Structures are given as C-alpha cells and as structure tokens.
Image: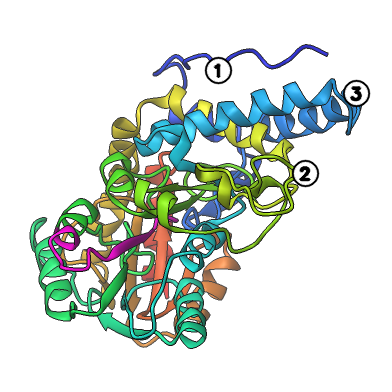
Amino acid sequence: MALPEPQSVPQRGSLTPDQLRALMPALTHKTYFNYGGQGPLPTPSLEAISEAFATIQELGPFTSALWPWLETLTSRLRRSLAASCGVPTHRLALTENVSSGCVLPLWGLPWEPGDQILISDCEHHGVVAACTELARRQGLQLGRFGVKTLVGGNGASAPEAALDALERALTPSTRLVVLSHLLWNTGVEMPIPAVAERLAAHPRRPWLLVDAAQSFGSLPIGPAAGAADIYAFTGHKWACGPEGLGGVALSERVLEQASPTLIGWRNLRQETDEHGGWHPDGRRFEVATSCVPLVAGLLHSLELLEQVGPIERRLELIKEPSGRLWRGLQDAAGVKPVLEAPPTAGLVSFHVEGHDPTAVVKALGERGLWIRSLEQPACLRACTHLTTTEGEVDHLLEALASL
C-alpha cells in the first residue's frame, strides 16, 4: 500500500459553495442552521475516513508497514492546523475536542493558592465547570467579567467595551483569563490580540485561554491563536470535519511551564520511558490511542474548504446569509436580534416575543428547519455557513413570521 502523497495546495476557486453543498447529504431535505453545533460532513470526507480504515487493515493494524503511513497522515494534519493558527508545528497539539484542548494544558499550569481565574460571562458551561473544579482543588479564586451585554451598534464598540470590562475586573492576583474568540451565544467577536497585549502589561502576565469552537473554520484565526496561551478548537463545527478531532495552539511559555495532566504513551518522548520524559512540544498533551482515520476526514474537509477559497473569502460568503438573516429579523414583527449591528461571522441570535425558545425550535423542526435554543441568555440561535442559500434564509424568516 502506497504512503499518502505530500499535501498538495488545493486550487482555490475550483469549487463553488453550491458544489460543496451538493457533497453534503445532511443538507438534503432540510434547512440547516446548526453549523455552530456540528457541521455537515461532506461525502468525500466520509469516504476518506472509510478508506483510511481499510488502509490500516491492509497494512496491518500493528505492523512496521503501518507506522510511516500513520506518521505521514498525522503530520499533514498537524502542519495544516498549525498554518491556520499561524504558529510553528511544535506549538500544535492534536486533541479530541475543545474541552480536552482547554483542560489538559490548563490543569498542568503551575498554580499557587489564591491565584484568580477570571472568566467572561459568555463562556461555555463545560469550560466554566472545568475551571470551577480546578479552583476547588487548587484553592484558587474565581472572578467574572461581563461581555454578554456587549451588542453595540458599531463595529468598534464591542471590542473596546470588552477591554474596558476586563480592565475593571483584573486584580493583582489574576493568573488566567478565559475568553472565547467568537462568543457562542451572542455571536460577538472578541479582540483576542488586544486582550493578550493588555495581559502582557499586567504585573503577573496572566495566561490567556481562548475557546475557539466557533472561530476555527469561520474566521481568520492566526493573530488570535498566535497571541493566546491556549487556543483550543474543534474540526467538527465550521470546518465540517468528523466529530472527535480538533487541536490546540499553545504559547512557548505554556510549553515551558505546563506539565501533562492525563498521562499516556503519547506524552512520552520515548514510549518505554516510565519516568516522565515528556515531549518538549505540543505532543506533551496528546494522551494515547486516537481514531486516526478521522485525520483523513478532517484533512479532506479542510482541502474542500480551501478549494472554495481562502478563509478571508469564505468569511465573506458566510457573512452574506448571516447579514441577510439579521436584516430580515430586524423587520420581522415580534422578533428582535441580539446584536444591534450586523454579525461579523455566521452566528445570529435572536428573541421571539411571547414564545418559549425550546417550543420554537420544536415547531421549526417539524417543518424541517433546524436551529437551536440557548439558556444564557435565553434566546434562539441560527448559524449560516457558506453553503447556506438565500432561499433557506427567507424560508426561516417566513416560518418565524408565521409563528
């Protein structure tokens, strides 16, 4: 069995959004707005996963012929993800999801009792719960700063207000700040490089942990990923890859300071080293056996997206339907968007007056329209991707009007 060829550069512009959409069976016979929960997997990516499983069995699942094939495949993905993050490959660890990308390095940092973890009020409950348990075990303080209400009417107000809110919440004991790149509930983009610059001026230089679940695959992430200490993302949302595979970009100082927390053979520089000879790079936070065929699927999805265009062009395509939806919601009776300015990406949250959000989701689902409800703040969320059509947006607006 031949080894994978070195990754070729996809020809940008060779695939249209409609052609990509046609490769996604999940978009057939339904109107889908849940890309922020899970993106549809293109058929070629599913086929790449199946082919990888077959290759493993043909080479032998534990043979000397297999290891070069596995290493070539995973190295291709590591290089691709590192390039998206704008970091060298040694700062990139492969993970199963955003949670593991956040928690594994976070729990390995050198904490001292009394250190403060400062968390925005728009973080996902999984990350908040991990920080809460870490604080309980290590005797840390928890603090909050408010970004939930930052939905201002011009492009500069929300980032500036976020920095102001952070400034007011910082204390001499602040050791870590937790802030998402694109807020999963309101859709506001946070000024991660500016936040990192502010923290660098703090006497203790707090670490910056960024949940990038909604930004990877939807925004250019290089400046933010390069500025953060922990920038954790997944491939199964906006990148339209398989669930169970993601990555985390780590700063040089995290690589210097953090120890592994969940220990397995992949942490070790040499597999037979029982005394903790850890990898000096991001692999220190890769634990043990993972589902390698998923690598082939995510690689294929990333290449398909690149064939549509670079991330800057794809963001323009994402914003066209999200802007159309936001403007339509402005004109809909009894409906109010959360944002007072057009979205900077594909997340559009809104309220329907007099209706319980979960009931709205159920009613729309019965019509083949799929959005989701959120609890904090209590609202509805529809996500548009470059595969979203004008007709789908209009269909959603008409269905909301009929409620």
The residue singled out by tag 2 in the image is: 272
Q: Pinpoint residue 252: horizontal percent, then vertical percent.
A: 36, 46
Identify the element where label 2 is drawn: loop
Placement of the C terminus among the 4 image quadrants: bottom left
Q: Which circle, 2 or 1, is nearer the viewer?
A: 2
Residue 75 as seen in the image, left or right of residue 62: left
The residue under the point 47% across, 74% down is 373
Residue 199 falls within the magenta-colored stretch: yes
Element assignment for label 1: loop
Q: Residue 201, percent across and down?
A: 12, 61
Mark closer to the observer (2, 3):
2
Residue at label 3? 58
Marks 3 and 1 sit apart, C-alpha to C-alpha, by 22 Å
Residue 383 falls left or right of residue 222: right
Q: Which amino acid type corresponds to the residue marked 1 in the rendered image?
A: Gln
Residue type, label 3: Glu
Residue lying furthest front in this view? 275
Is residue 49 within the magenta segment? no
